Image (spheres, rainbow, N blue to C red):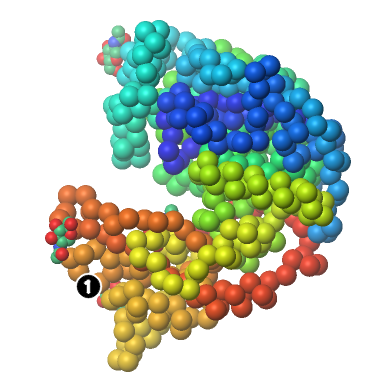
Amino acid sequence: MLPFLSSTHTLRNLVGGIVILYILISSYHLTKTWRYPTRPDLTFKQDNSIDCAAFPFPPTSSSPSKPAQQKPLQAPSPTPHKPGLCPLPLIFSDLSQRLGSHHLIDVLASLPSSVTDNNTDFDVYFKQKEYASQHRDIRPLSALPDLRADWRTAGHNAAWALDKYKFLPMVLAAWEAEPNRDWYLFTETDSYISWANLQRMLGHYDPGTPLYIGNPVRLHAEVPEREFYMAHGGSGILLSGAAMRAFADKFGDEKTAERWHARAKDMWYGDFVLAAFLDEELDLQITPAWPIMSRETPRTAVYGEETWCKPVVVLHHMRPEEVSEMWEFELSRWGSELRETPLLHKELFKDFVANEDLGARRDDWDNMSGERRFAVPLPPSANTSATEPDPVTSVEACGEACEVMDECLQYTFVAVNTTEIGTCWLSSVVRTGEATPVEPVPDRAETRRWQSGWMDKRIRRWVDKQSCDGVPLSWKGELPPQ
Ligand SMILES: *[C@@H]1O[C@H](CO)[C@@H](O)[C@H](O)[C@H]1NC(C)=O
Ligand SMILES: *[C@@H]1O[C@H](CO)[C@@H](O)[C@H](O)[C@H]1NC(C)=O
Ligand SMILES: *[C@@H]1O[C@H](CO)[C@@H](O)[C@H](O)[C@H]1NC(C)=O
Ligand SMILES: CC(=O)N[C@H]1CO[C@H](CO)[C@@H](O)[C@@H]1O
């Protein structure tokens, strides 16, 4: 889990044959998100149950085992679900705690002392236990730095360092708590799941086959010798029942477990540890699900040819109010004829982006035009033509360069305040992006500033041209363009 992490919890929720595991992030994080639940659909009740009525999800049909296939856009109609009570989710954490009606299980408690003793990574873990036993507020511990941070983990807090030890025990614990389910979805508290689409997607995969499905992230630095991808934790990690069974057989072996616990110490992220284990021990590699499972919000999502007609199952980095917005949106869909059709990226665009005023340039804003995979090259004439200003000299010139390139839909200009020359990125996809304040450049008396602009007329023309009619609906994802 690349972006924020401290440590891991798993909140499990059973619906039909699917086990949903929320990888929640450390006790501190959790106590925060608890106050502003990122999942308004989980209506936690005093009687230890969840009201399933809140799910726009047809849990009555358990996932059929169908081979993957393409379907026409007229999607299979989901069985309308019966409102009822779902079992209490189970949460795996790094501290045994009670929060509301929830019991958080300390997933690190199963680690042998050979791993936790004399290991500074666990200082925060034991300190946290001590604080909790004294009924002290544990949140200040989130300020402790990762003592063994290197360039890869610089800036992480101490709780982050526990992440890598958690994933394997968590997967085993999930299997032991709830064996023989069809599917297990591991995700995080700031992830949003479209339950109806998840159900539809799983209908296209066979849980009897070992499957590891997710948003592939290539880790060049970890595995330089070949193309190796991990499923990004925040985008959701789906393991089939068959994969879980095979995992439990292997990791259930004490010697194998100890070997991996020891190795985890020098690895970075828990989701990478899991990917490496599946690859090495089970020869199980990722089934890519980008952009269906993604690490984006509706506003940072990529809108382009690659995604327009693709369904949405997981969104990530969602602030609580964004989850609420998404939730309202899905509820309103659920109340209309759209209920029968899968939620597609184009709908997110129409609901979350189209109403934005993308005509005006935004200062202190990063529209993510810099992502290389969607880059449009700068116009070739830029440095030779006497009439056209070089796009790297100003945000205006950068915008003009975008104007010149037919496929350019937006641009970002980034510059430090001490020089006239900046960087101009042109992009072939639309993303609203997010506010990015002027930032000081470390160790230099400089600040860096982001400015973004959109070709609004061109975007509108592009949108008008798009149609998903007749486009076969595919629940198969892909490797994201690199
Ligand atoms: C603890 O680890 C350090 C460094 O890895 C090592 O030098 C020391 O001998 C270890 N102490 C014990 C009691 O294992
Ligand atoms: C134009 O020149 C600038 C600086 O001289 C350089 O950084 C940039 O890459 C050039 N652009 C093109 C399109 O050649
Ligand atoms: C750039 O910004 C930094 C930090 O605010 C400031 O110290 C510096 O004087 C500025 N430089 C110029 C040339 O404006
Ligand atoms: C989060 C993200 O994608 N940030 C990118 C935004 O775009 C700039 C350039 O516009 C890149 O440098 C960032 O990595």
Q: Quadrant of residue 327?
A: top right
The furthest residue to the bottom = 387
Residue in view at x 29 percent, y 57 percent:
438
Say above or below: 379 vs 283. Answer: below
Q: Secondary structure at mark 1?
A: loop
Who is closer to the viewer here, 333 or 63?
Answer: 333
Within 8 Å of ligand 2, the CB of disc 1?
no
Q: Nearer the viewer, residue 130 or 43?
A: 43
Toward which corner of the image does residue 117 lie, by quadrant? top left
Q: Give percent across and percent down for residue 423.
A: 32, 68
- Residue bearing mark 1: 420
Residue 474 in the image, given as x and y percentages of width and height = 75, 55
> Are there few (<14), some (14-19), or many (20+) residues within 10 Å of tag 1?
few
Residue 172 seen in the current view: no
Q: How many marks?
A: 1
Residue 83 seen: yes
Horizontal and vertical percent for residue 73?
Answer: 81, 59
Q: Amino acid at mark 1?
A: Glu
**Horizontal placement of 479 versus 141: left or right?**
right
Q: Position of residue 405 (x, y in %)?
A: 48, 81
Q: Residue at x 32, y 65 (%)?
A: 414
Q: Which residue shows up at 41% across the image and 80% down it? A: 401
Asked if residue 418 is positioned above or below residue 136 in the image, the reply reads below
Q: Is residue 461 above or below residue 78?
A: below
Residue shown at 72%/37% (left/top)?
55
Please state if 245 lies on the left or on the right of 31 as rendered. Answer: right
Within the displayed image, which quadrant is ligand 1 positioned in?
top left
